[in-house]
Amino acid sequence: MTRHNKKRNSGLLYELLIRKISRSLVEGDNKSASISKLIVKKYFSAGTELHKEYRLINALVNVSVGSESVAASVLSEAREASKKFDSKALKIEKSNLIREINHEFDKDEFYAESVPNYRMYATASSVIGYWRSEKHLDINTVIDYERKLLEALSQPQTEVKTEEPDPNIDNLVVKVATNKMQKKYESKLNENQAELINLYAVEADLDKARIKIQAIKESAVAGLNDYISEKDGNLSNKLNLVIEKIQGLETDNVDDGLIARTLEIIELSEELKGVDNETIS
């Protein structure tokens, strides 16, 4: 792969900011969490060119349509959609975003965060840049990158989530962008954590976030009860205390503190799943 500048990749910048929010909340760094949330809302709100480009990159990286012919059609539509952005406005937004990130955070630490599917994000961003005549790639590289995107899009379809359509992006690309793959993240920020952060920090939908938190609590308690049934009395007593704390967690006021505690509950649930898998294997 040719050298990729992650600082100009809107897909990677969004993912890095979401991980910054999560890490800050868990570590109790409310200042960094608040700054990160404000930056995401400022630059990735619906209607911005960055939001449009992020959704297009996300559609190419994180969805599967289950058919090579449909995947080819999606790639063709994505190519046309990429040319409809306001390139000047996008460049300004991206430069301002990078400047703000560099000003607010330690650059080396921020950009060093691991992002799942990094290479695919880089591939999608490079191809989009080529389609818009903003990036030079030799024809063999273009063929290789588009082949990789086609292979990813052609993977078997999985359960999907829906997202409000954006009228500024071509209809077919929007349709595909809403069919996000349900895949586990390879970094510390897993799917449940990412969804919760998105509801709280990006969409600012506290009602949906509260419902999500309640579901997470119930799932964690169920998982702990299953785990306890196979353990001795001493460990069971300790885990019962954990269950009581989870059940007693108030969800009326959805704030940074509640989000941080819920992220930890999610991590505990994932660790229990890992222990169960190790036992089975």
Image (tube, helix red, strand yellow):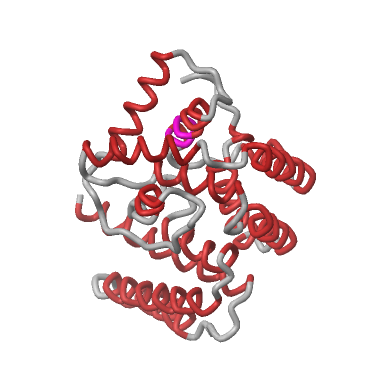
70 vs 132, left or right, is left
Q: Residue at x 49, y 81 (%)?
A: 245
Q: How many marks?
A: 0
Is 169 one of the magenta-colored residues? Answer: no
Q: Residue at x 47, y 36 (%)?
A: 121
80 vs 275, left or right, is right
Residues drawn in magenta: 120-124
Q: Residue furthest right?
A: 103
Query: Residue 269, how many percent across, how many down?
Result: 39, 65
> Which corner quadrant of the image does residue 160 belong to?
bottom left
Q: Nearer the viewer, residue 78 or 68?
A: 78
Q: Nearer the viewer, residue 61 or 86?
A: 86
Q: Residue at x 51, y 36 (%)?
A: 83
Query: Residue 50, how many percent across, how many down?
Result: 60, 47
> Which corner quadrant of the image does residue 103 belong to?
top right
Taking 119 as reference, is 102 above or below it?
Answer: below
- Main SS of the magenta segment? helix
